[in-house]
Amino acid sequence: MKMPSMFGLLKRFWVLVVVVVALVAAAVVVSRLRTFFDSDLPPAAGSGHADAIVPFNTKRVTYEIVGPETTTGRVSYLDIKGQTREASFTSLPWSVTITTTDPGILANVVAQGDRGSLGCRILVNDKVVDEHYTDGRDAQTFCLDKAA
C-alpha cells in the first residue's frame, strides 16, 4: 500500500486548508485590532466613565404650611418620585424641602388644621410659585405647581 503524497492530500483537502488559513488570519487581525484600540484592557481604577452625567441645575422645592402658631393638623405632599408623603404638625409654620436634578416635577401639598385659617406655599429655589390661604372652621388648603 502506497502512502499518499503531500500534494495528493492537499489536492484532496484544499477547501479545508483554505478555511483553516482564513480563520487563523482573521484571529490574528482581530487580536491586533483589540490591542491597538486597548479594548481588551479593563478600565483603570478610579477613572470615571467618559459619558458620566454629572448632576447640575439642582432644584430645591420647599413646601410650607402657615397659620396661627398653635394650629395642629396633617399635611400631605409629593416627594421627588411623585409618591405621597404624610406628616403631622403640632405648631406652625411647618416646612419640608426636597432636592432634585430632574428637569421638572409635580409639586403638590395639601393641609388641614384645627383652626380657622391656614395657608400653604410652594417655593422653587426660594421663589414662590404657588400660594393659597383659606379661612373657615378646620381650614383646609392646597397648593399645586405642575412644572416645579
Image (cartoon, rainbow, N blue to C red):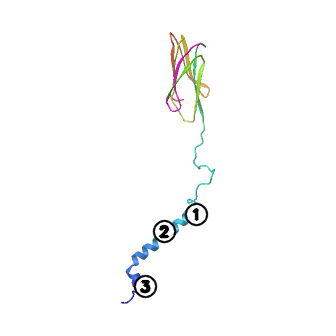
Q: Is residue 22 left or right of residue 68?
A: left
Quarter holding the N terminus is: bottom left
Q: Residue furthest front?
A: 1
Hey, which quadrant is residue 60 in on the image? top right
Per the image, the residue denoted by label 2 is: 26
Q: Horizontal and vertical percent for residue 25?
A: 49, 71
Q: Is residue 31 above or below residue 82?
A: below
Question: Few, some or many C-alpha atoms within 10 Å of disc 1 (few <14, some 14-19, many ≥20)?
Answer: few
Q: Tell which circle, 1 or 2, labels the residue nearer the N-terminal end.
A: 2
- Name the residue type under label 2: Ala
Q: Tell which circle, 3 or 2, labels the residue nearer the N-terminal end.
A: 3
* Element at label 1: helix
Q: Is residue 2 above or below residue 94?
A: below
Query: Residue at 39% of width from left, 76% of height from top?
Result: 15
* Element at label 3: helix
> Is the Cβ of the residue at disc 1 closer than 8 Å to that at disc 2?
no
Q: Can you tell which mark lies on residue 86?
A: none
Per the image, the residue denoted by label 1 is: 36
Question: Label 1 to label 2, Cα distance in Å?
Answer: 15 Å
| Numbered range of the magenta stretch | 70-83
Nearer the observer: mark 3 or 2; the answer is 3
- Name the residue type under label 1: Phe
Query: Residue at 43% of width from left, 76% of height from top?
Result: 17
Q: Horizontal and vertical percent for residue 89?
A: 56, 19
Q: Tell which circle, 1 or 3, labels the residue nearer the N-terminal end.
A: 3
Question: Label 1 to label 3, Cα distance in Å?
Answer: 38 Å
Query: Residue at 53% of width from left, 66% of height from top?
Result: 31
* Element at label 2: helix
Q: Can you tell which mark lies on residue 6?
A: 3
